[in-house]
Amino acid sequence: MRTRTRSWPAIVVIGVVASCALSTGASATTGQAGRPGSAPAASPIYLDRHYSPEERAADLVSRMTLQEKASEMNSSQAAAIPRLGIAAYGWWNEASHGVAAEQTANNVNSPGVTNTTSYPVDLSMGSTWNPALMYKEAGMISDEAREVVRNNNLDLSFYSPTVNLSRDPRWGRNDESFSEDPLLTGAIASQFVDGMEGKSPSGTMLPGSDGYLKTLPTLKHFAANNSEYNRLTGTSDMDERTLREYYTAQFRDLVQQSGPAAIMSSYNEVNGVPAAADVHLIDELARETFGFQGYFTSDCDAVYEIQAGHHWQPPGASAPLDAAGRTAYANSAGEDLDCNQGYHDGSNYANTVPTAVGQHIQTQTGVYNENDVDVSLVRLFTARIETGEFDNEASVPWVAAARARLAPGTWVNSDANNAVTETPARLATARQSGDQSIVLLKNDPVKQQNGSTTKLLPLKVPSSGAFKVAVIGYYANPTSMFLGGYASRQGPAGVAKEVNGYNGLKTAIQRIDPDATVDYYPGVTPGTLASVDAASVKAAANYDAVVVYAGTDGSTSSEDHDRTSLALPGAQSQLISQVAAVNPNTIVYMETVGEVDVTSFQNQVPAMLWSSYNGERKGESLADVVLGDYNPSGRLPFTWYQDITKLPPIGDYTIRPTASDSGRTYMYYSGPVSYPFGYGLSYTDFAYSHLKVSSRKLDANGTLRVGADVTNTGSTAGDEVAQVYVTTPDAPAALQRPIKRLEAFTKVSLRPHQTKHVTFTIQVPKLAFFSDQANRYQVDDGRYGIQLSTSSADADIQAQTFVHVSGKLTPTPMTVTARAVAAGDAAQGISQRVYFPDHVSVDPQLTVAMSDDTLYGYIIKGSSTALPAGMKVHYRSNRPDVVAVGPSGTVRTLGSGVATVSATVDYHGKHASTQFVVDVQ
């Protein structure tokens, strides 16, 4: 839940003990809200900061006609309503590794922006294993966003970050993901969300924010959208255990750690249901179970694909859905916003919602009606109000700060902006992120001319005299630098601030030795990667050292384009082998979308480095690592498979091994790997000692504390990533438990010979597995291995101990949600509402999610489960003259106005709560 610095009116508290399923209420008059055409008050509620953002949003939406409401539900763009002071608003904006696009035009794909800072892509940030660095970078991205968007307060919704997991190296968008692991992804992406929203690293509002969000990040794509060849119309089929433990686990962590503003649903089906209309995904999992409180947007144009691509015919429907039907099913499932550009036709929410409402379409949740629209509109305008759009600009700290850095109205989306927002501080952070992302894969000793043997890296450049380095490969000095998907355009002013691999190495080497020679050779025939340039190979023999810079780009894989082979494009592998054959001092750097096949050359070169697309200062980062100005600390965020034929087909979404494949990810894969998850070398050495655990015997509801010492035993300062994995060594094979799971990690900086004590806390309930049979999480009894390691490989375990867990998980309340209706609504097919007539009973339709994922109360239409005996429910109203809570806990509207009702459940001393707005007409 978003924490705000607000003062509220006094509240009235009433408690009631619930021991049965919540009732849908009896009969009462149903009043459809709306104040269209009414004269505005001198100080309307939606402009009054004494009310909460949700209350203000409810008041604003109540003043709209149905057609106006519908016009606000398109991403590209939402319409202006001048009479209410509502500006046109672009929801489709991009900022995954720098501000890249702003929806400034109507009914077109989001236009790109020019000359904004381009940082390393998500996969590079994943390889830093440094959430704090991600937070720093995201804060800079959101600062820059506030500087360049219209009026510093519009178009603040960003379709970032991508948190789908890199579970298959062939996926075309691996560079957009952080990791194959849910915990690592959640840890880093949560800091992206917090930095973008202007929160603290713990997810709370910063004191200087005055309760406003800086931007509105969007988690995407929910869920299991990890294959491009069928991403629009395919179905990702799996059991519920796989869906919860793997494909949505990082979404859960992000919702509960950071409270993101938005989630984007995906194009694909999950188990045969289009994600954009999947009540189980959107409502039952994201909202009711995980506790998501923001708005859902479709991918662009996932609502259209329900009809055009999936030809979906819902259970009970007489035919596949038409344009009105797809709108009704998606919106009633909780898809609040239609990203209406991309693979679109002429229909969208704006022009189909009124028709769909008028047709009274029966959906999974009830009869589609204007109340469904109202709920979505309140979510959307709550978010806009939370950014300060409707408040005095001088009172919004993010606006004031942006205008202090850059005079309002001076930034233009062309090269005429002179790349003014690509500031030295931001470029330095791009370089720092690039430094920490580079993974040292290999660093073998090489025999020197004087007969000694030493590791090739860091490259030892003399301070003076002749020294020659060749930088070879197209990607080292390309005509246009590839920055990854969803990167900003760089005009001449922006290009002037880029540093490619060749220029970065040349500048850094000649800074050390002004007499040094650093030459560039293409390595491949000009204009193509197809064949090796013999002249480049011949020349390589005459240099003291060679850096071969290999890579991929958007032509290798991208959105809508998977890889079918992991080979380096063209003749780059042959180039590496041929250069290594003539010069033993060959360093290979690979800047790629993900892993590539290194089997043909990895035994021929002494040193290998890898990163994904590493930002506009990538050349400085490469030079920092090659020359030892930065000791490499990157660790692989994925498994580098040796043989992809051991993997399932990319469209197979199973994770655990089957009779025909070896499974996926370090958690289950049993085949050979080139480099394990979490792997990365350093220019120094580290040692681990004194592993201790707080207890050898633990209850299923307990907490385990792990401690150990980490020592830098070398002579070079460095950063180590200590990783804690948990195993279940005695689990029956039939249960298919993971080989191991990452449960904690920390990145620790150590001077030479310095020792630091590191500690980790593991909640035993987090070790539970989801049971499809019981439909809940359960903790296995038995022995658990606690491994302190430098990667997921058993060979890299530094220390290990075992603990024993017994007992049953005690479910406690985790999340409460409300889907309020008036008495009598159920008979009319109304399943939710914001607006109520006066003097009617309000049924909150509470859902309580327990810590084991069991749900009680209202779940979905036709499905309610009695609350556990003894669970107490307390209701509060902040304006008892508008909504009153009776002695028995009944909620009833009294007079015109808007109020917030709080619902708190108490069960065995544990509490969880929610709030919902009631606008009384």
Image: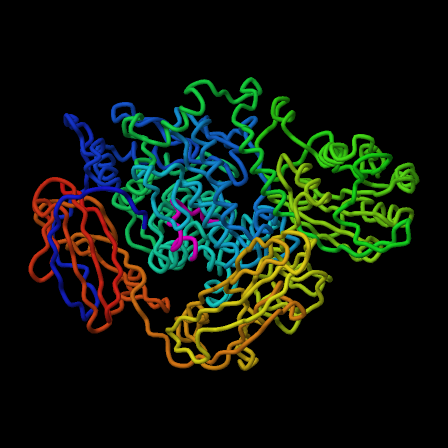
Q: Residue at x 76, y 42 (%)?
A: 549
**Image check: 863 left or right of 43?**
right
Q: In this rendering, does residue 880 appear at all?
A: yes
Residue 265 in the magenta stretch? The answer is yes
Its colouring scheme is: rainbow
Rendered location of residue 156, percent (x, y): 41, 34
762 or 343, which is in the foreground?
762
Q: Is residue 677 above or below residue 625?
A: below
537 or 303, which is in the foreground?
537
Instruction: Say which quarter of the image contains residue 869.
Output: bottom left
Instruction: Say which quarter of the image contains residue 46.
Output: top left
**Image check: 795 left or right of 863?**
right
Residue 433 in the magenta stretch? The answer is no
Q: Which residues are magenta?
A: 253-266
917 or 536, which is in the foreground?
536
Q: Residue at x 77, y 45 (%)?
A: 459
Q: In this rendering, does residue 355 appear at all?
A: no
Rendered location of residue 599, percent (x, y): 79, 58
**Image check: 512 left or right of 114?**
right
471 or 525, which is in the foreground?
471
Rendered location of residue 639, percent (x, y): 64, 60
Count of labels in the image: 0
- Quarter of the image containing the C terminus? top left
Rendered location of residue 622, percent (x, y): 69, 41
Q: Residue at x 23, y 50 (%)?
A: 916
**Image check: 596 left or right of 491?**
right
Q: Is residue 581 above or below residue 845?
A: above
